[in-house]
Amino acid sequence: MIGTGNRSRPPAVGYGGETANGNSAIPAGTEELRVRVQQLSLREQIERNHFLLMRLNAANARLIQSLDHGDVFEAIAEIIANLMGCEEIAVFDYHPEERTFSLAWSSGVEAAELQPFLTGAGMFGRAVQQGLSQFQERQAEGVLLPHEKNLTACVILKSSGEIVGVIAIFGLLPQKSNLEWADFELLKFLEIYGAVAIKFQRLQGKQVAP
Amino acid sequence: MSNKKILLVDDSCTARLVNRMIFSQKSNYVLISAVDGKEAVERAKREKPDLILMDIVMPRMTGLEACRVLKKDKDTQKIPVILLTTRGEEQYVQEGYASGCSDYLTKPVNDGELLDLLKAYLGE
């Protein structure tokens, strides 16, 4: 095994010591150090953004592909599973006229466990009423219903102000303790473009219906 | 970086897409893909990749089964296999190494970490 993880690299210029290639010592001033720290921080930011863009690009490509295959709900769950790190996901269709939900896709969660969500109560209901995604870590203490204990997030799928569905994200993978910055960005992307893809699929269904 | 050939095996289209993006933007590796363990074994025998990056949970043949088959075959046993999976618990990691894999990465994968690991295995 070679091992994984970010390997720390020694600085090219030491703290007043020799340069990496063994040339004569250059005293490292405070200003030089400050610039170096700033450069490293900017590089890190650029790399983080680049990684996020790649993930969004992959998510976008998968959604587009799903329009041909008619598997938008599965695609949304697959994007979350692979790019965010969660294998317990349910995607609900929302029917605004009747204000009801129906289960469109789930993986890693028993259908029986999802039944209480169809009542539209709790965090799930708040997401629809407010038209805003809800995250467990941002909920006030004691407001979670018993069936919501393992619920990490309810993500609203909304296009042009119209709610078309909700993604329920349950337990994250064991190696992932909480949602990170890039996860929130990915979910923001899905809020809009996941909804657009669902609307497209619905229209496509209407076109092919007899 | 050289044009070494990597066989990416994953039944998830999203995983294949994101890995393809990582490789195309940050390396010169030639990427070929398979959607399950059975296809991976066939492609590995036929195309002799320099490294195999493989998911575990897949239909038809899992990554662990495919890894065992590859390690028993004299034509493919020297190809490093990195298992890529959502399961990070110790028992799964041990099971992975018992199948003969060279390394084990958990999803979601960090692109820098993945490329560093590949470079290390490909001697770059």
Image (cartoon, rainbow, N blue to C red):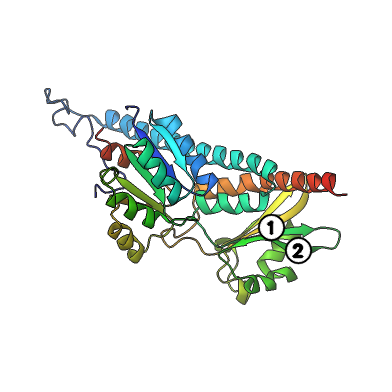
Secondary structure under tag 1 reads strand
The answer to whether mark 2 and mark 1 are in CB contact below 8 A is yes
Residue depicted at 65% across the width and 44% down the height: A66
- Say what amino acid the circle numbered 1 marks: Val
Q: Which residue is mark 2?
A: A101
Can you give x and y, in whole percent of width and height, for residue B99 in the image?
Answer: 31, 57
Question: Which chain is disc 1 placed on?
Answer: A
**Nearer-N-terminus badge (2/1):** 2
Does residue A11 appear to the left or right of A99 in the view shown?
left
Can you give x and y, in whole percent of width and height, for residue A101 in the image?
Answer: 76, 63
Checking the image for residue B24, the label placed there is: none
Q: Which residue is mark 1?
A: A166
Alpha-carbon neighbours of circle 2 within 10 Å: few (<14), some, or many (≥20)? some
Question: Which chain is disc 2 placed on?
Answer: A
Instruction: Tell which of A93 and B50 is nearer to you.
Output: B50
- Say what amino acid the circle numbered 2 marks: Phe
Residue A146 position by quadrant: bottom right
Does residue A160 appear to the left or right of A47 in the view shown?
right
Placement of B17 over or under A171, stated as above or below: above
Secondary structure under tag 2 reads strand
